[in-house]
Amino acid sequence: RETLQLAQHYPNIRVTPWRMVTIWGGASLLKMYLRCMKDLLEMTEWQWDYFINLSATDYPTRTNAELVAFLSKYREKNYLKSHGRDNARFIKKQGLDRLFHECDDHMWRLGDRQIPEGIVVDGGSDWFALTHKLVEYVMNTQDELVIKLKHFYWYTLLPAESFFHTVLENSHMCETLVDNNLRVTNWNRKLGCKCQYKHIVDWCGCSPNDFKPQDFIRLQQITRPTFFARKFEPTVNQEVIDILDSHLYGSLPLGTNALKAYWENVFDSVDGLSGLTDIALTLFTSFFRLGLKKIQSSRQSGVEGHCRYKPVGYPLSVHLYFYDDRFQGYLVMQQADSLTSGQTETLETWVVPRSPMHLSDPGTEPDRLQAV
């Protein structure tokens, strides 16, 4: 919603008028990419050369000018990272020989199936940079192979990690493939492969780890053409993002306000209450009521009642607040009726997490029991 408003001020930004919920490993992610490609091709007034997918946890490691210079020099190439040479192992590991169906925000495994014969089945990373020519081919071709591959991948786990590789390698543009996805991914298999996402898919999944300041040396490598890296999450570590910004664009002036602060919106009433679970709504409403209790007692103003304010409705917004990479609490904004003035006011309460208590030296047994 806010992105649509922001895009109106920039001629080089387009935002899809639709929204699509995707899940990890789901066929919906591939459908979302294809729908975006369709929209781009219909924007005939807008000239573009590459389709590069990025997520909220990606961040540039080189300037836009460097990226443009590189892609302009090798503008006929398609960049997709392959898994390696052992196709049979990849097919088993990815579950390509299993039939999946996405329903109710879950990828259900239905049974076994046969891999199409007579074609090269490949895959790897689902982060890529595809040429306008390849995108146009994928979306507009009447080639029976591509049409059948789309249907095959509607019922495939992690389809975006294999569909574009397979289409390209079996097309007349196969020689344009470059085994590089132009990014650095922070893989640590021991930490990131704990059979994750079992609550979403009937399969075991892996996820890359977040970059931290000690990993910055990897982001400075110049031996490979990489222009993005992942994952970055400011709720985990904001410092490494600040370091990368300073490296690319120079340091901000001394004394810049809120350099170490980070706010993340988790709810806005304009989007409706449907985005909150009953538990979350109860918690946020309770936080605001507790905040009102901290306000000066109404007894001091001569008004009967426990507090000077009475909460109205539900929260207007909720933010997570971090400072210096430490969680500082929730910021809950809501309206409340003033029992003193009779007017409705908008207030924000800051709910600070309470530090855990530790008994360092309980002493004798009786003292320990008393401390407990």
Image (cartoon, helix red, strand yellow):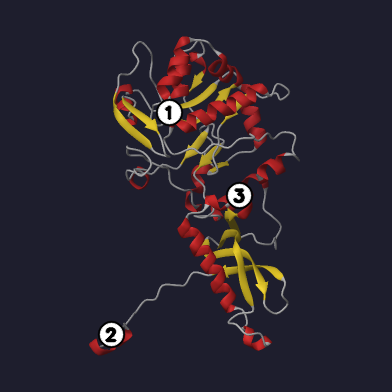
Q: Secondary structure at mark 3?
A: helix
Q: Pointer 3: residues within 10 angstroms few (<14), some, or many (20+)?
A: few
Separation (CA) of disc 3 from disc 1? 30 Å
Numbered label attached to residue 368: 2
- Visible residue check, residue 72: no
Residue at 42%, 24% in the rendered image: 153
How far across and down, in percent of the image, does residue 140 sit? 57, 15
Eye-nearest disc, 1 or 2: 1
Q: Secondary structure at mark 1?
A: helix
- Residue nearest the observer in this picture, 20 or 254: 20
Residue at 57%, 54% in the rendered image: 267
Q: Which residue is mark 1?
A: 159
Work out whether 366 lies above or below 85.
below
Separation (CA) of disc 3 from disc 2? 51 Å
- Visible residue check, residue 150: yes
Q: Earlier in the sequence, mark 1 or mark 2?
A: 1
Amino acid type at circle 3 is Asp
Task: Return the residue found at the far left.
Answer: 365
How far across and down, in percent of the image, does residue 274 sit? 53, 50
Q: Pointer 2: residues within 10 angstroms few (<14), some, or many (20+)?
A: few
Residue at 43%, 25% in the rendered image: 154
